Image: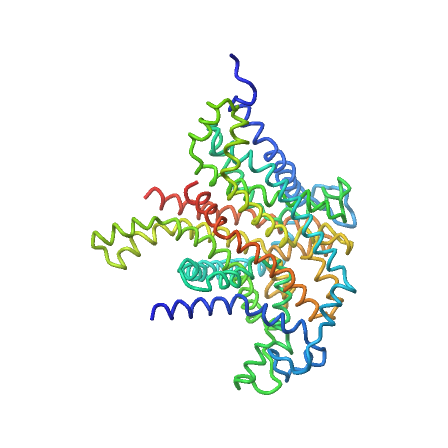
């Protein structure tokens, strides 16, 4: 009985969360005459399915460029984030300075300063360094969103590494720095994976900065490029829009799901026992 | 022997921290101060020269009824979404930590709303809530709740528009809250529960004396993230309603964007956006206090 209830709840949750995507998928393959008739059943193909609108996405829009921009911006931002936050988290979690507590809180507070507050002055600064209308402006700015969260997540992971491991490595002749690089970093690999996934998701979803900094079509990431190219004034290219949503959503959810357990482990340690 | 550089914890700590601190100071603290300076000036897209005008922008904001409406909407939007996100997130987390066949597929489907870029999922919803072709209206018509040819105009009526914006937002963030709370549920050592059971504690007693206190801190963290993402979010509002109809769904973040970027009135936009920070800070301090009290108590 409880079993049936659990399955029922699980399926209900899945339908509520993924329902819109199923419907998007159906819409993406519909003919215009099928779609734009309010009497037609919106969940079925009332006329034969057509791949035209999905193909349009690839042939007539810069969809692949947007996807590529999101991918390389995300990859670079993840690299920058790790390079900055891993040592910072180690210093805060392990090097036992008197100011590490307050500084940890200060870094967390940075997360409370929202993009909606900063985008106006940041867009001025982006113009100032000559990166306006370039995808590189996003590479420069996005780490400000990802570094604070990542420091926080990684601190949790680092606190779980037993101190003996570094001490043993130092007895073996490594310096403190060497012990960190050779002994500690490999042990927090799950945490690094969690950061990679979380930072990439945050970057790919970001909307305000991308909207404010980058106007030329070919420099845009998915989150602003798809809406601007497939919405022309009042005309929405609905089938292509839905196809784009599904094409981006599925791979990201798939990868995120692969790393979900590690992500959960990281959150617990950082948030609760921090 | 004098310790080498790589062995001195104090120097190393500074070397490790300095890059992150500098990055944040230059790209968060400086623009933050700049935002305050803009809010006290008359800078606009047409006239970028800086003239100090004191609190004039704030007075202008206070005189504008749209500001008060946005402020009220921001609170309604945040509070309602947060409560729903935390409650539904807890329910979802309980489902996802249970063991059952096909769990991987369910988890994958449940994660979709959170991993999809918000601009794209909002556009999908825009079509779901379309004034004529909404499939929700179609179902209601088939069920006879709506008459033939009738529509609800989800995004065209103030009450429904707000409901829609909140619903989409809750749909999007509940999976994240669930993931955070799964972490909390997984972290409760099962031997605590076992021990309580051996000692004769019943289900409800265990629930209120073990599970709830242990989950509360992590629920508070989920609430905090929910509040930050909600309070500062304008993507859903912007894509679905552009603040309309008649500013019924306008929030501070979207109004600041509208004034500052689209209207070109940088100074006014900055003054409006500046209101986000103290409110957010108060919320964060409040939630973190609750967490600390629970942990100590």
Locate the C terminus of chain A by quadrant.
top left
Residue ranking furthest to the front = A172
On screen, residue A53 above or below B10: below
State the count of labels: 0
Residue A214: give x, y in percent of width and height: 74, 51
Residue ranking furthest to the top = B1
Front residue of this view, candidates B99 and A77: B99
On screen, residue B229 above or below A41: above
Q: Residue at image x 39%, y 53%?
A: B185
On screen, residue A96 above or below B30: above
Residue B258: give x, y in percent of width and height: 68, 57
Q: Residue at image x 34%, y 68%?
A: A2
Residue A229: give x, y in percent of width and height: 75, 62
Left or right of B149 on screen, residue A3: left
Residue ranking furthest to the left = B200
Q: How is the image coloured?
A: rainbow
Say which quarter of the image contains residue B90. Answer: bottom left
Locate the N terminus of chain A by quadrant.
bottom left
Residue B196: give x, y in percent of width and height: 25, 51
Front residue of this view, candidates A13 and B228: A13
Q: Residue at image x 76%, y 46%?
A: A132
Q: Residue at image x 42%, y 34%?
A: A162
């Amino acid at each position: 009985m409880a079993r049936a209830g659990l399955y029922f709840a699980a399926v209900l949750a899945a339908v509520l969360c993924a329902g819109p995507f199923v419907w998007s998928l159906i819409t993406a393959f519909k003919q215009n005459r099928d779609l734009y008739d309010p009497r037609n059943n919106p969940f079925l193909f009332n006329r034969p399915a057509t791949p035209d609108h999905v193909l349009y996405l690839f042939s007539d829009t810069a969809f692949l460029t947007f996807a590529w921009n999101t991918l390389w911006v995300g990859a670079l931002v993840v690299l920058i984030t790790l390079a900055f936050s891993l040592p910072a988290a180690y210093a805060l979690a392990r090097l036992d300075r008197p100011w590490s507590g307050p500084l940890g809180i200060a870094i967390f507070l940075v997360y409370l300063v929202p993009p909606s507050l900063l985008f106006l002055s940041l867009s001025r600064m982006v113009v100032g360094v000559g990166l306006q209308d370039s995808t590189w402006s996003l590479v420069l700015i996005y780490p400000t969103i990802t570094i604070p969260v990542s420091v926080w997540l990684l601190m949790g992971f680092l606190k779980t590494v037993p101190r003996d491991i570094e001490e043993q490595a130092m007895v073996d002749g490594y310096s403190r720095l060497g012990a960190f690089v050779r002994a500690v970093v490999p042990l927090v690999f799950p945490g690094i994976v969690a950061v990679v996934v979380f930072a990439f998701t945050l970057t790919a979803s970001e909307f305000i900065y991308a909207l404010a900094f980058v106007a030329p079509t070919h420099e845009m990431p998915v989150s602003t490029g798809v809406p601007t190219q497939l919405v022309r004034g009042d005309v929405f290219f609905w089938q292509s829009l839905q196809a784009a949503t599904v094409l981006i959503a599925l791979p990201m959810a798939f990868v995120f799901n692969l790393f979900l357990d590690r992500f959960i482990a990281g959150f617990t340690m950082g948030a609760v026992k921090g | 022997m004098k310790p080498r550089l790589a062995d001195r914890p104090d120097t190393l700590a500074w070397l490790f921290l300095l890059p992150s601190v500098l990055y944040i100071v230059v790209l968060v603290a400086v623009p933050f101060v700049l935002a305050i300076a803009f809010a006290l000036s008359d800078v606009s897209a047409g006239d970028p020269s800086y003239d100090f005008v004191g609190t004039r922008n704030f007075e202008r904001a206070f005189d504008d009824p749209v500001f008060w409406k946005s402020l009220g909407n921001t609170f309604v939007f945040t509070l309602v979404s947060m409560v729903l996100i935390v409650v539904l997130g807890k329910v979802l987390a309980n489902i996802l930590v249970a063991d059952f066949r096909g769990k991987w597929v369910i988890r994958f489907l449940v994660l979709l709303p959170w991993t999809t870029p918000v601009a794209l999922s909002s556009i999908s919803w825009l079509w779901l809530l379309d004034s004529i072709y909404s499939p929700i209206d179609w179902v209601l018509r088939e069920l006879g709740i709506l008459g033939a040819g009738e529509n609800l105009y989800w995004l065209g009526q103030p009450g429904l528009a707000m409901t829609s914006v909140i619903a989409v937002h809750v749909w999007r963030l509940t999976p994240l809250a669930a993931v955070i709370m799964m972490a909390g549920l997984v972290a409760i050592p099962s031997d605590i529960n076992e021990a309580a059971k051996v000692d004769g504690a019943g289900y409800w007693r265990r629930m209120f004396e073990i599970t709830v206190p242990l989950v509360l801190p992590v629920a508070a963290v989920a609430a905090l993230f929910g509040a930050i993402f909600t309070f500062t979010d304008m993507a859903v509002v912007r894509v679905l309603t552009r603040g309309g109809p008649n500013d019924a769904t306008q929030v501070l973040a979207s109004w600041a964007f509208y004034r500052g970027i689209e209207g070109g009135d940088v100074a006014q936009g900055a003054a409006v956006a500046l209101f986000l920070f103290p409110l957010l800070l108060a919320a964060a301090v409040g939630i973190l206090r609750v967490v600390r009290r629970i942990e100590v108590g």
